[in-house]
Amino acid sequence: MQKKLILDTHLLHITVDRLCQQLIEAHGDFSETAILGMQPRGIHLADMIHQKLEEDLKTKIDLGYLDTTFYRDDFRRRDTPVKANATKVPFIIENRNVVLIDDVLFTGRSVRAALDAMIAFGRPKKVELLVLVNRKYSRHLPIEPDFIGKDVTTLESQRVLVELEGGKHNKIWLINKEEK
Amino acid sequence: MSQLSQKHLLGIKNLTEKDIELIYETAKTFKDVINRPIKKVPSLRDITIANVFFENSTRTRLSFELAEKRLSADVVNFSSSNSSVKKGETLLDTVNNILAMKVDMVVMRHSSPGAPHFLSKHIDANIVNAGDGTHEHPTQALLDTFSILEKHGTLQGVKVAIIGDILHSRVAISNIFALKKMGAEVMVCGPNTLLPKYISSLGVKVELDVMKALHWCDVANVLRIQLERQQIKYFPSLREYSLYYGINRRMLDQLDKEITIMHPGPINRGVELNSDVADSDHAIILDQVENGVAVRMSVLYLLAGLHN
């Protein structure tokens, strides 16, 4: 299995800092905006960004987790069903700006499911998408991110492995499946 | 693993501990869903489910129907009282006719023990047993144990007394299987005539004195006297039954701890439970009803997910 490191802890730090600055540019003091991390792997990034924004802005910012399992379009089309995770939306979505956060944007199908899942809680004013890794040229749906950590050009057969634990050993790898 | 080991839910007996845990975990997320402003998810939108009830049912059918609709499935209802069963059609023919209309899952209640097992050998659709005679009622046991888990945080070592008509109760059998699998201690309590002869072979304690059972247990699951299943008299009168086995507030006040009271419904107030108990803080009877929808959503979702 061939692995290539895309981001290490140091680079990730710089990238998250930049993403936070871009978010502050676009959303000001976040009084109208909430952050929504996508389960299961987007929530660590959402936590990191949320923590950094609260430190920088010295204010409370709404944070939620969204599980898309029951809204997926591949139910009964996969070999094994996806396990559901907790959804926590402890704020009113109606008429708020929402920044959806996920680790990797690939086909766009999870984001489509997330939009459906989110609308079950109300009608947001505006929704934007932030991803750490944007796998270019691999979309199945017309979905593009608004804030991007890093663009990578990948083959369909490759995989992006994100090891985000919030600690010091964060690594994002590009893996060649065929080399297994 | 995020899938069940079984294609059908025929009884608790065939489920593994892992299956039951997966059902609880998924039910927990569905409980969140049914408490949202929009209580529906689109997961089963391309699935049709037939609720085939050869025996009367109000709450189980309603609960299944709600669960199916919350999952966006298409639902057809069938009850034997207004069907061709009355004209002499066999069970297999009836169900095959329903399946010919392209139904993916069958939720069935039947008065004969083993009817869903028989069906599962002959048809392709996923089958959910909603009660087969005096045999099993798996979703009721799952929702009962899920409610205990929710209230007590664990099932391991929890002492559960099942009180009442054990002989005619599929709820009791399924509950015993589920509780034993998940590590709870189980006692059955009732008049001698309403206890099956070999019940202790299932690994449960047997007690005839209801007060002793209440002292022993953390949870009392009180069952209804199923007069409709009793062809002979098992006790002299309802009044006498309620005198010896009915649970009232005074009895609970005598205990040195707070116990949880459960009942699968419908309650015969003044027979097995007095109103001062059924409506008290001890009772989680309405939580059971709410959990019933979430647990049934979980079962239907997990079974449907196995389809390839």
Image (cartoon, grey):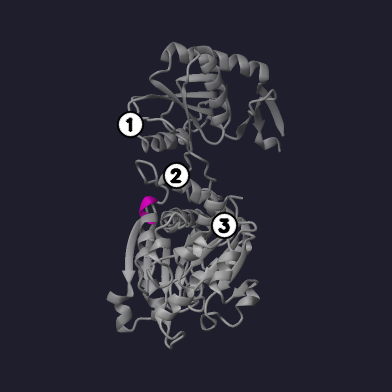
Label 1 resides on the chain identified as A
The answer to if B70 sits in the magenta stretch is yes
Residue A47 or A134: which is nearer the viewer? A47
Label of residue B257 in the image: 3
The CA span between labels 3 and 2 is 31 Å
Q: Main secondary structure of the magenta part?
A: helix
**Is residue B83 at least partly visible in the picture?**
no
- Tell me the SS state at disc 3: loop
The CA span between labels 1 and 3 is 48 Å
Left or right: B263 as drawn, with respect to B175? left
Q: Amino acid at mark 3?
A: Lys
Neighbor class of circle 1 (other Cα within 10 Å; few <14, some 14-19, many 20+) is some
Q: Position of residue B148 (x, y in %)?
A: 53, 56
Instruction: Decide: is A128 above or below B109.
Output: above
Label 3 resides on the chain identified as B
Q: Position of residue B70 (x, y in %)?
A: 37, 51
Specify start and end residues of the magenta stretch as a single range.
Answer: B68-72
> Which quadrant of the figure has residue B99?
bottom left
Mark 2 or 1: the one toward you? 2
Q: Amino acid at mark 2?
A: Asp
Left or right: B228 as drawn, with respect to A8? left
Q: Amino acid at mark 1?
A: Arg
Question: What residue is pinned by disc 2?
Answer: B32
Label 2 resides on the chain identified as B
Q: Are marks 1 and 3 on the same chain?
A: no
Q: Residue furthest bottom?
A: B232
